[in-house]
Image (cartoon, helix red, strand yellow):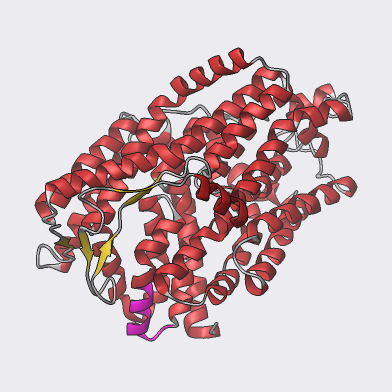
Amino acid sequence: MPTWSQVYDPLNSGFLSTLVALIPIVVLLGALSSHRIRAHWAAVGGLIVALGIAIFAVGMPADLALRAAGFGAAYGLFPLGWIILNTIFLYQLAVDSGTFETVQRSLAGLSTDRRIQLVLVAFSFGAFFEGAAGFGTPVAVTGALLVGLGFKPLDAAVYSLIANTAPVAFGALGTPIIALQGVTGLDLRELSATVGSQLPWFSVLVPFWLIAAFVGLRRMWEVWPALLTAGVAFAVPQYAISTYHGPWLVDIIAAVCSMVALAVLLRFWQPPNDPQALDQHAHGSGLAAGTSRATTMRAWIPWIVLSVLVFAWGTPQMKGMLNAISAPQIPIEGLHNAIIRTPPVVAVDKPETAVFNFNWISASGTAIFLAAWISGLMLGARPTKMLRTYGQTLVRVGPSLLTISAMLALGYVTRYSGTDAILGLAFAHTGYLYPFFGTMLGWLGVALTGSDTSSNVLFGGLQVITANQVGVDPTLMAAANSSGGVMGKMIDAQSIVVAGTATQTRGQEGAILRRVFWHSVALASLVGLLVFAQAHIFGT
């Protein structure tokens, strides 16, 4: 089979090659931020430009570029689209049954203050789903919950994205860290502990940042006990488990600790009344007090079943058993091992694999699918009605599924053409400042690929090689790739589309991007400063 080796300076000018590699990203983000271009057209436009750059500027064979695009589009539908479709289906069943209003009441029973509700749902509860499933699940679930609680749909999308940051590196039972170890060969426990020395600071910061973005600094400080409790109760176990156990259960345990600690605090403390932050519907009608315990428990059935199944599906034992039943690995003919990554991105020439993992039984989306059907039957829904609801949900999310496919196709063309590595190498020329810019490389990787795991796979080896060249601890920089990457999660195209779909704000993806972009840059820069201090001031 003929192969093609990636070229990282196709124009014989590092500056010009970097500018050309940036064009698809600029086109995509510019189109998304425009008020006049819908997300699917922005994605298609970015994809066309990326294909043109790959074929005509980089010299990638056209058939390889098209196969890479097809591979990415397939990944957009499965597993990502499969997660979104079934999460929205579950949410719709809960709404149709009337139980979602009761969920709203039970949350209002803890606090009618929207600031507290936002931290509880978007940060603490969302971190649980990040740890159990990742890959878009937490944004889809928390976005839908926040809309049900009465948040404006656009606000729900924005704040779900901002909250889904600090837990991401340990998402899906530590998948990003495990993948990082696989491509770097570094010790898994050391990687986990190093990330655990970085992200807990931001686990404390993010609740404050989230509420400041929501209501401003003055009204944020009115609820500081709740924010500190939620953040510290997450950060302490996050540090301890990642340091002394490993990456697998970090988010799960930390999220449960955060939710329990916040619930205990609210039994003894409530924020001062703030008419602008109160859930007036819940406060005024006494909804929390007027609901029986049995009714409340019944209303939480879909979310309890979802949590149990998603967690069970994510355990290594269950995943291994389900994969043994049916986990077809489908090599993409003509693309698998046909593209060679070359030094300095890798130490020696390395073929790029292209295997579509159609693990339809062990996929998180399948757990959500089963949770929806089990919950619907337990709530008394008729199977025929559930089938109609599923069809309606498919029609509703269809355009978003197409958008996600186009976004992922663009990301895969970027990866297989090597334009991602061209951008990465540009960061590597920063010398003494590399700890900061290497962290920003992780941010860029997630912004481009939509996945901390993918960013670690793409740039993990480069981080180690460059760290050795500039005299920095390679474990620190590999970990920084993941820690910096989590702040890019809120601006990657697929997360924005997932948030827009879950909150029924399809067509407003540009507005979401504009609102979260500078939060992403600022938080990533703070991670970069921390890593710089660890490298040159404090040591690790």
Q: Position of residue 296 (x, y in %)?
A: 82, 29
The residue sitting at 62% across, 29% down in the picture is: 372
Q: Position of residue 395 (x, y in %)?
A: 44, 20
- Residue stretch rendered in magenta on the structure: 463-472
Left or right, residue 362 beside residue 235: left
The residue sitting at 54% across, 37% down in the picture is: 366
Identify the image quadrant of residue 238. bottom right
Q: Which one is in front, 224 or 407?
A: 407
Q: Position of residue 59 (x, y in %)?
A: 11, 56
Chief secondary structure of the magenta portion:
helix
Left or right, residue 106 beside residue 332: right
Asked if residue 455 can be seen in this view, the reply is yes
In the rendered image, the vertical position of residue 335 relative to residue 15, given as above or below: above
The residue sitting at 61% across, 28% down in the picture is: 91
Q: Look at the image and tell me in which quarter the C terminus lies.
A: bottom right
Identify the image quadrant of residue 111. top right
Q: Look at the image and tell me in which quarter the N terminus lies.
A: bottom left
Left or right, residue 226 beside residue 496: right
Q: Position of residue 147 (x, y in %)?
A: 61, 30
